[in-house]
Image (cartoon, grey):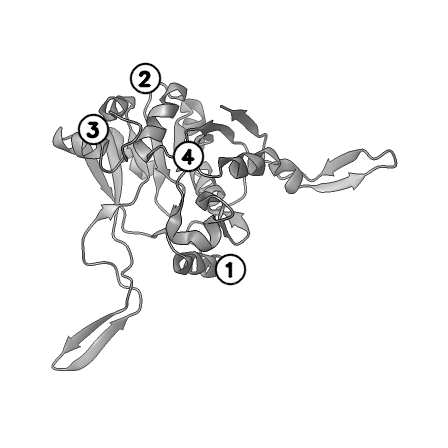
Amino acid sequence: MWHSYCKKNAMKIVLLAGGFGSRLSEETSIKPKPMVEIGGIPILEHIMNWYMSFGFYEFIICLGYKGSEIISYFKDYNFKNSSCIITENGKIETLNTSKKPWKIILAQTGVKTQTAGRLKKVSKFLSKEKDFMMTYGDGLSDINLKKLLNFHNKKKKLATVTAVKPLARFGAMDIKNDNVIDFIEKPKSESGWINGGFFVLSYEVIKYISSCQESWEKGPLPKIVKNNQLAAYKHEGFWQPMDTLREKFLLTDLWERGKAPWKTKKNTNKNILEFK
């Protein structure tokens, strides 16, 4: 039922995939950060798979640094995920093509454009009458997107951000009377809730963007907060960004051990690409 509802409403998902990823330079010197692989699959595709598992299939990918790598990946996706037969006359035929039901707009938004600017530049692909979702191209979660959207609709704000508590960098010890009574290898941060991405937004947020050279977090968001138009959906479950090589290894380990909370069933259907 929910699957059919989402397809009918065709809510668009904006993916911010144009940053340099300088803290992951071991990988991003040769590829854009969203194309860094977890278990042989780009993290960008992992994120898209999660949205598709809730019935959201229309994506607007904001390209920037090494955007041509992302274009090439999706352009050749069917060929790379198929078995091939080369006939006597040299013709290549594909078998068992692994297709996905996505519709993707690959939008060039500039190498040096900031995150808010990227959203502003792709606003022409959005409907002024419909809300849309947006997230970063480097974070994975097991967030229930159905509950997130219902929460947004209930609050009736211009924007909803997913609030998360990240894992602390170091383990924590509970000490009483000089004795360690508990040791937690990966405790939740005590610093409180932070921006975990996975936004639901009204088209009206575009008017809060004054320049393509301002970031989403430092430009529009504080203005939206000042007008009391930002709701926070608290997600207590899994959330993990991939900012460093250490975090890439953490996510890869979860995937390879079959413990990845974001793993979904494969979707198969037609693919539609648009280059803008």
As drawn, is 252 to the left or to the right of 77?
left
Q: Relative to residue 142, is residue 84 drawn left or right?
A: right
Residue at the spot of label 2: 129
| Residue underneath mark 3 | 157
Q: Nearer the viewer, residue 165 or 145?
A: 165
**Residue kind at label 2, given as amino acid type:** Glu
SS at mark 1 in the image = helix
| Precedes in sequence: disc 4 or disc 2 | 4
The residue beneath circle 1 is 256
Q: CA distance from mark 1 to mark 2?
A: 42 Å
The alpha-carbon separation of the residues under discs 4 and 2 comes to: 29 Å
**Within the image, what quadrant is residue 184 found in?**
bottom left
Q: Residue at x 39, y 49 (%)?
A: 22
The residue type indicated by label 4 comes to Val
Indicate the amino acid at tag 1: Glu
Earlier sequence position, callout 3 versus callout 2: 2
Residue 41 in the image: state x and y as whole percent: 53, 48
Q: Crowding at label 1, few (<14), some or many (≥20) Cα neighbours within 10 Å? A: few
Q: Amino acid at mark 3?
A: Lys
Neighbor class of circle 4 (other Cα within 10 Å; few <14, some 14-19, many 20+) is: some
Q: CA distance from mark 3 to mark 4?
A: 31 Å
Q: Secondary structure at mark 4?
A: loop
Looking at the picture, does residue 258 appear above or below residue 76? below
- The percent coordinates of residue 100 (x first, y second) are 56, 35
